[in-house]
Amino acid sequence: MVFKQFKYTFTVVLTLVCLLAAGRFSFAQEAAGEAGVQEEKTEKGFDANEVILQHIKDAHEWHFFTWKGHPVSLSLPVILYVPNQGWSVFSSARFHHGEEVYKGFQLMTGEYIHAHGLDPNKFFAGKVIAVNEDGSPNMDKAVYDLSLTRNVMQMILAALLLFFIFRGMAGKYEKNPGKAPSGFQNAVEPFVIFIRDSVARPYLGKKTGKYLPYLLTVFFFIWINALVSLIPGSANVAGNLAFTGVLAAVTFVFILTSTNKHYWQHIIWPPGVPLWVKPILIPVEILGIFTKPFALMIRLFANMLAGHMIILSIISLIFIFGGLAAVAGWSFSFVSIAFTIFMYLVELLVGFIQAFIFTNLSALFIAQAFEGGHHDEEEVIL
């Protein structure tokens, strides 16, 4: 019992640590989304592109809303490491939204990139770089950004929420063994049984107990982040390539550690295949090892990002029509709000579906790594 508890706790902690590592790479998505876009402050009115990008990208501050022209936000810790210089830890408020230099560091904005003629494919708004005394970029000094960004903070909050929910449920099961679930247990237990009986057992057979903790963890973690991201002012964690990429990488590790000699024999030297076909098939099989986690990453990322962009685009239409004529804005607002509510309901379902698909494919890919896993007898779990 003690070993099982340690194993389950280790699985959760390992997943959380890997997800926190995503903070180092979370700005890569911004570079793709903002490449070639100049973020200049103009008086042209509502900029839907800027609003949508601001919501889906990561940041060193947690922006909730703007009140009377002033942003209401929470400044987050900036943690930087420079070789031969050491660590620098301070609040992102020191940058004053990228308008000031602090301790030789600059939070880049669209205006800064444009003013210094930097390549937007390499430098993007939100990245912290070292600068010279005159404010110009110092290309010779490498800066490693390990900050607790908005996405990282929301993942931590979601993980803590998940921990307290299931820790409380586990305490009830320990105090009342064998008794029917009550309260919040009634709402969560069907999903646990669903993942066990409809996802894990059909693929993993008697090895269900070995992989079920991970499958449950990844299912509920994706789902709870998808739900939290629908709260206005929250971060779009589930629609971030760093988030989905790390989850896919963790599944990839489970796949590789579950393989046996039969798995590699079918890849390196496929049996029952004509000799002249093997030079063609072997590279395809090797490529297939990496396409599985890649498919997991892109599928989850694209579906979760698309929903948020559709919702924000529909809401933005109110202000776009309002910029043409106030009557048009008010008239279209009823249609826009109705579609937004509909999309929110769809996103509630999409969050569950995408968490299920990711978990289901993870179980399938892990089962394919060991021969005959789904033909073995089932093991009774829970």
Image: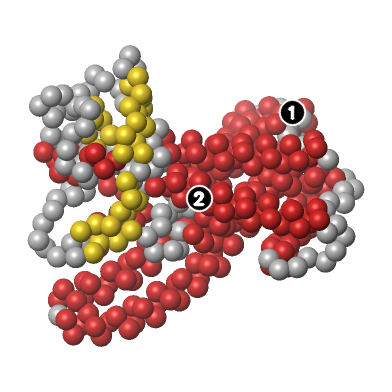
Q: Earlier in the sequence, mark 2 or mark 1?
A: 2
Q: CA distance from mark 2 to mark 1?
A: 44 Å
User: Please, which residue is most extreme toward the top here?
Assistant: 84
Q: Quadrant of the N terminus?
A: top right
**Residue located 45% across and 76% down the image:** 342
User: Please, which residue is most extreme toward the right here?
Assistant: 377
Which amino acid, mark 1? Gln
Front residue (pair 4, 165)? 165
Residue at numbered disc 1:
265
Q: Is residue 276 left or right of residue 16?
A: right
* Residue 129, above or below 336: above
Residue at numbered disc 2:
157
Percent coordinates x, y for residue 361 in the rendering: 65, 50
Which amino acid, mark 2? Leu
Front residue (pair 2, 58)? 2
**Residue located 13% across and 30% down the image:** 135
Q: Let me know if residue 177 appears in the view.
A: yes
Q: Are marks 2 and 1 in contact (CB under 8 Å)?
A: no
Which structural element holds mark 1? Answer: helix
Front residue (pair 248, 188)? 188
**Residue located 69% across and 63% down the image:** 188
- Frontmost of labels 2 and 1 is 2
Percent coordinates x, y for residue 219 in the rendering: 63, 53
Percent coordinates x, y for residue 276 in the rendering: 66, 29
Front residue (pair 377, 110)? 110
Percent coordinates x, y for residue 100 in the rendering: 17, 38
